[in-house]
Amino acid sequence: MKAAVVTRAGDAPVYTDFDPPSATAGHVLIDVDACALSHVTRARASGTHYSSSGGFPFVAGVDGVGRREDGTRVYFFAPRAPFGALAERTLVPAANCVVLPEGLDAHRAAAIAIPGMSSWAALTERAKFVAGETVLVNGATGASGSLAVRIAKHLGAATVIATGRRPVRAALEACGADCVIALDQDESALRRALEPHFRRGVDVVLDYLWGPSALTLLTGAAHALPDGYPLRFVQIGSISGGTLALPAAALRASAITLLGSGIGSVAPDRLLRAAGDVLLAAQPAGLAIDMQVVALAELRRYWADAGSRARIVFTMGTPRGEGTAAR
């Protein structure tokens, strides 16, 4: 079969032949229809993700959408090594599959599953979010962050505050953000913009950036939150930096709880459940991100394209076109 194969650490996968999987007890064979190119897929393929396990060669891709041998359409997560989602066929533990809702397009499902799961699990599993609370999404510009705004609203957030770069204000408001704060301003200006919101009380922060903006959020919250106000700060992504020099006093002077959300901090079955909930909510909640559907044979051209705003979705069939919206 054709697949995206990683042969050694640090090398990008190549489109080549790989022996297909065989039936195995407790697992299902899946003919893959679509697999989105996510940060997790890239990082695990390169060996830099904290959940990377090594062992070569292997097929890249941590999740996707396909059909079981009986024709049932499913979303699947964590194929059995050395098989992955970026292949014509893969092998997945039976427990790692959820049936797709009727009418949900395979490409759209593949595009929104992981970015949607990131905020759904962070809110429901880690923050124990309660409808009526206020949520701040730090880094709402990207696919995951913009979906987080929609998901927080769908789950009942009374107010959603989004931070992002200035040109995307209208887009974030269209996603349901009640307030958009520009990140491309100096630290003191950003702190002033955040202060009134913290004084009113922010219950949950979903942080996709870490780095300088997260430091400003944490120290600003410690200063401005009402005494004893229980803010839950959930760290999801680290696009702006992997480390943070946080003053100890910021935690002693506040009731901030620091949490992480991802592979390891949430049990695999709970992550899969969150993905299933996202897919069930996709149509009623209007979950949408821009996507570009391309053939897996074009792997080399698109693998390193980390700057595109559209989410790359590889298809094992004929692409239906480029620049389509996952709506």
Image (tube, grey):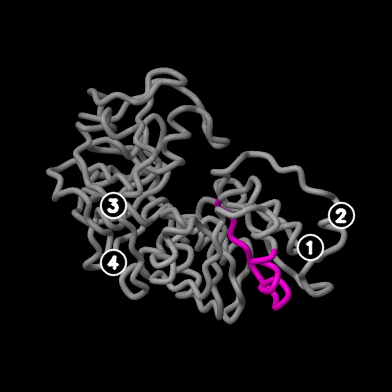
Kind of residue at disc 2 = Ala
The answer to whether the residue labelled 3 contacts the one labelled 4, judged by CB atoms less than 8 Å apart, is no
Q: Position of residue 129 (x, y in %)?
A: 60, 71
Kind of residue at disc 3 = Met
The range drawn in magenta is 192-208
Q: Which mark is residue 249?
A: 2
Residue annotated with mark 4: 101
Mark earlier in primary sequence (4, 2): 4
Crowding at label 2, few (<14), some or many (≥20) Cα neighbours within 10 Å?
Answer: few
Q: Secondary structure at mark 3?
A: strand
Kind of residue at disc 4 = Pro
Q: Secondary structure at mark 1?
A: helix
Residue 190, picture quadrant: bottom right
Q: Position of residue 219 (x, y in %)?
A: 76, 57
The answer to whether the residue labelled 2 contacts the one labelled 3, judged by CB atoms less than 8 Å apart, is no
State the residue at coordinates (68%, 39%): 243
Mark earlier in primary sequence (3, 4): 4
Mark earlier in primary sequence (3, 1): 1
Kind of residue at disc 1 = Ala
Distance (Cα) linking label 2 and label 3? 43 Å
State the residue at coordinates (27%, 64%): 327
Distance (Cα) linking label 3 and label 1? 38 Å
Classify 171 as above or below 213. Answer: below
Q: Is residue 111 left or right of residue 204?
A: left
Q: Is residue 70 magenta?
A: no
Distance (Cα) linking label 4 and label 2? 48 Å
Distance (Cα) linking label 3 and label 4? 20 Å
- Mark whose residue sits in front, 3 or 1: 1
Residue annotated with mark 1: 222
